[in-house]
């Protein structure tokens, strides 16, 4: 069975969408894959409760616990890697995981680490994507599923969804429209990825 580990920081709606599709489309029988764990860097992440309710195992690796460490990012990533690797994952899915990862982390999961970003990459990497799209006068916005490489928000694109920017939109209304599409493209991109990768790393 191929294991998928999902990393979250907040509401976890993408994680829930992926887990629901995995259940509905019987990934364990059809793709020999399952969501085996949800890991959050925030103990208060709402998504942890959702994961519990869906009977998914959860872990917390609190980045704040490493604040006094001489190399906090390296130490956090090392502990996170141990928590992830305990599940021997075929795929690690970033779903609203709001930490910048070290190059060592990205290299360790090369070829099996993916992310969703709420813009039509390569436009608007980084934060506040919806407001930036509105400010730039974009007529269209969207979301991108991509492989994670050392270059933040720039890895090879696996899937995209486009939505219109409507008159009167603010970041909230545009963000909601984009998020609804994220919930469709992320599970589908993962299923496609699983179909194409036939060998366990
Ligand atoms: C999504 O918009 C995702 O693209 C971005 O953070 C948000 C996470 O939402 N990286 P959720 O935690 O999946 O609800």
Image: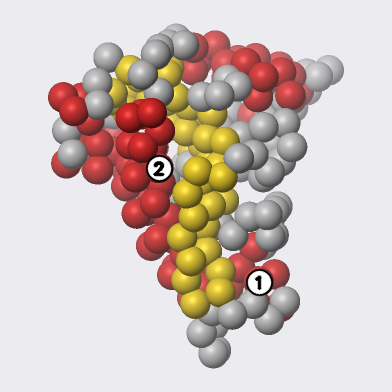
Left or right side of 94 for 32: left
Q: Is 163 situated left or right of 70 in this image?
A: left
- Secondary structure found at label 1: helix
> Could you tell me which residue is drawn at 61 percent across and 34 percent down?
148
Vertical placement of 124 versus 33: above or below? below
Residue 21 pos. (x, y %): 25, 43
Dividing the image into 4 quarters, which one contains the N terminus? top left
Dot 1: within a 10 Å radius of its alpha carbon, few (fewer than 14), some, or many (20 or more) residues? many
Q: Is residue 21 shown to the viewer in this render?
A: yes
Residue 130, compared with residue 92, is above or below; it is below
Residue 40 visible in the shown view: no
Q: Residue 151: percent from the left, percent from the top?
A: 74, 37
Image point (71%, 18%), residue name:
104
Q: In this view, does 184 lie to the left or right of 24?
A: right
Which of 125/66 is in front? 125
Q: Which mark is residue 189?
A: 2
Q: 104 or 62: nearer the eye?
A: 104
């Amino acid at each position: 069975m191929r294991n998928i580990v999902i990393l979250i920081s907040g509401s976890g709606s993408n994680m829930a969408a992926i887990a629901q599709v995995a259940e509905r489309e019987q990934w364990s029988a059809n793709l020999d894959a399952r969501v085996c764990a949800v890991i959050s860097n925030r103990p208060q992440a709402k998504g942890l409760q959702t994961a519990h309710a869906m009977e998914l195992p959860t872990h917390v690796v609190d980045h704040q616990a490493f604040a006094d460490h001489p190399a906090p990012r390296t130490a956090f990533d090392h502990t996170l890697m141990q928590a992830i690797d305990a599940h021997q994952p075929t795929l690690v899915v970033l779903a609203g995981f709001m930490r910048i990862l070290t190059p060592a982390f990205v290299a360790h999961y090369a070829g099996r680490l993916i992310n969703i970003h709420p813009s039509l990459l390569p436009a608007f990497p980084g934060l506040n994507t919806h407001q930036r799209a509105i400010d730039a006068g974009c007529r269209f916005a969207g979301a991108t599923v991509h492989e994670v490489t050392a270059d933040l928000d720039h890895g090879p694109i696996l899937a995209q969804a486009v939505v219109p920017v409507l008159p009167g939109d603010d970041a909230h209304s545009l963000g909601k429209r984009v998020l609804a599409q994220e919930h469709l493209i992320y599970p589908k991109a993962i299923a496609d990825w699983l179909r194409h990768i036939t060998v366990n790393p």
